[in-house]
Image: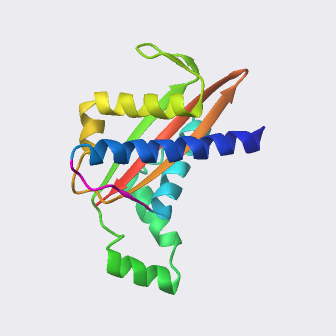
Amino acid sequence: MERNIRKSNREIERIIFKLVNKERSERGLKELSPKAYLVRAARRHSRDMIRRHFYGHENESGSGPLDRVEQSVKENNSFFGMLRRFFTNETSSYVGENICRMPIGKVAGFSYINSEWDVAKTIIISWMRSPGHRRNILDPNFRRMGIGVACKRKGGTREYYATQDLQG
């Protein structure tokens, strides 16, 4: 079961990534490139929200999006990783984050949510309806993105936590 949940999480991440770039390209903006360190930071934050029972951009230790992205970049400190960061400016402090909680089942204002596609599409719709989230998605200064999804299971129900980390 756990393997199926992880596979489902990755599929939702893939769909969200594709839909975000579709929103951007429809408005003449450059598509965002995937970065493993942003995916790592986003996945950790989604899992952290479930593990520590909170929902927000800062955890109880005060760690926020920039802290998580910087930590993830530091972890990739091989010689070639440092060289790549130097030439691609992966240490940019221009960072944004969107988060979302999405239950499986009936969600107010949406149709019944049951599949990975439903979860991903509903997350994108909710982000695009929110001025702050929409601004992040359509910000022309962002060039890189990582999506991280984690699933909280309680009894027979599931709730997905999604984090989108963006960087200029």
Q: Is residue 99 above or below residue 109?
A: below
Left or right: where does residue 144 sit relative to residue 102? left
By secondary structure, the bulk of the magenta-drawn segment is best described as loop
Q: Residue 147: x and y, percent?
A: 47, 49
Residue 122 in picture, x, y percent from top left? 44, 28
Residue shown at the point (62%, 36%) measured from the top left: 151
32 or 152: nearer the viewer: 32
Can residue 110 be seen at all in this image of the molecule? yes
**Where's residue 16, x and y in %?**
46, 42
Give the quarter of the image for residue 145: bottom left
For the image, the number of numbered tags is 0
Q: Position of residue 19 (x, y in %)?
A: 40, 41
Quadrant where the C terminus sits is: bottom left
Look at 64% across and 26% down and name the residue there: 158
Compared to residue 140, the image places residue 107 above or below, namely: above
Q: Is residue 59 left or right of residue 154?
A: left
Position of the N terminus, as image quadrant, is top right
Can residue 58 be seen by looking at this rendering? no
Segment colored magenta: 28-34
**The magenta stretch spans residue 33:** yes
Magenta span includes 51: no
